[in-house]
Image (spheres, helix red, strand yellow):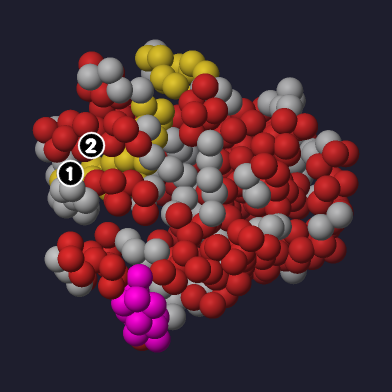
Amino acid sequence: MSTDSKQTESELSPEISLLLACARTRIDLETADRIRESARRSLDWDRLIETSLAHGLMPLLYENLNTHCADIVPPSRLKQLKDLFQKNAARSVLLTGELLDILELFATEGIEAMPYKGPAIAISIYGRLALRQFSDLDILVRKRDVWRCQQLLISRGYEPHFNITERQLPSFLKLGYVQMFTRDRRQSVVELHWGIASRFFMFPLDTDRFWERLRSSNLMGRRILAPSTEDLLLLLCVHGAKDLWERLEWICGIAELVRAHMDIDWDATTRNARELGAERILLLGLFLARDLYGAELPDLILRRIDEQPTIKSLAGEVRENLLQLNPQSLGLRQRIFFHIRTRERLTDRFRYCTRLLFTTTPIDWQILPLPPSLSFLYPLLRPLRLAKKYALDHTKSLSCF
């Protein structure tokens, strides 16, 4: 943790303290001593392992316990973690093989596609597939290629979550940003993206410039497309903010990326984020990486953080909920208010609210199928549907809209 957090470190549960110490690929002597000291404490090992799985940090927990204090950890617990680690590693290899097959299938049709999250991040940030948990495959394509990609995935045995016709496709592409496909009784999940976040979240990524900045990378001996380091950093911060930073691994990934790439063009990164109205989102992610994992940030970033008190306020809320063994699900109003405060531009806050209320989604189409002649009613009916739905269950995620 950063020096800003030292005064509250003693307030953390021993399980969370140990998990935070292990959640990194590079362990210095001070951190190694901290790991050994934490491992000697009276720990609820069931809760620790359960929490590590929930936060996507089980592989790093096992790796560092096995490396730095295998003589301290109860043998049965170390074996339990080893079994989980090996199962995760085996599944990661299978999923990566499936990803590469899908990318090759797309390439034969002349479709450029970029692996997004999953195995690509495991390699680029952690250096090994086995060090990251992932259960689905995320692939980013251009809007113009979505229909062909959907047909190719269907030919491979996948079923789309939303059955979209060609007539509905233009509206679907405009209103949404992802289509989920499943196979083998949901054992294999592919998320086909043409955007980064839902329309109401207000992250208007310039896709043409984004695709121009892609670079070549290597995944299990195969060439793949990958975002620039600066773009990847912003994407990770947007993903975390969109989902309210509910997993420690998302912050860990940012800290690892910053440590691994000392040549980040910080001027370009902040300028790009500012143009997209996402500078506060970027700075929040970076501050959390510094606060929880000690990521070193340049003076430029630290000054920008200090100039915006809202960032530390938001980080405090994230930390308070995240560093509990039993984090509470945030209610709808809390989620909306958090999202609004992550945006620095008043216009984005206003458009977030209006789009959230009135932008139709495929879920609206499914719940209330209307003939084309009555489709103009959807924006009027949507607020009523949401009011009824969330009055019954206020903890629903915004992704369910």
- Contact flag, marks 1 and 2 (Cβ < 8 Å): yes
Residue at left 21%, top 51%? Answer: 168
Q: Amino acid at mark 2?
A: Trp
Q: Secondary structure at mark 1?
A: loop
| Location of mark 1 (residue) | 166
Residue at left 59%, top 66%? Answer: 350
Task: Please give the range of residues in magenta.
Answer: 379-391
x%, y% of residue 77?
A: 47, 51
Camera sees residue 371 = yes
Circle 2 residues within 10 Å: few <14, some 14–19, many ≥20? some
Residue 167, magenta (yes or no): no
**Of 316 and 358, the residue lying toward us:** 358
Occupied quadrant, residue 321: bottom right
Q: Amino acid at mark 1?
A: Glu
What is the distance, in whole Å, between disc 1 and disc 2 at their CAs? 8 Å
Q: Is residue 348 above or below residue 293?
A: below
| Location of mark 2 (residue) | 147
**Of 94 and 371, the residue lying toward us:** 371
**Of 164 and 305, the residue lying toward us:** 164
Occupied quadrant, residue 192: top left
x%, y% of residue 140?
A: 39, 35
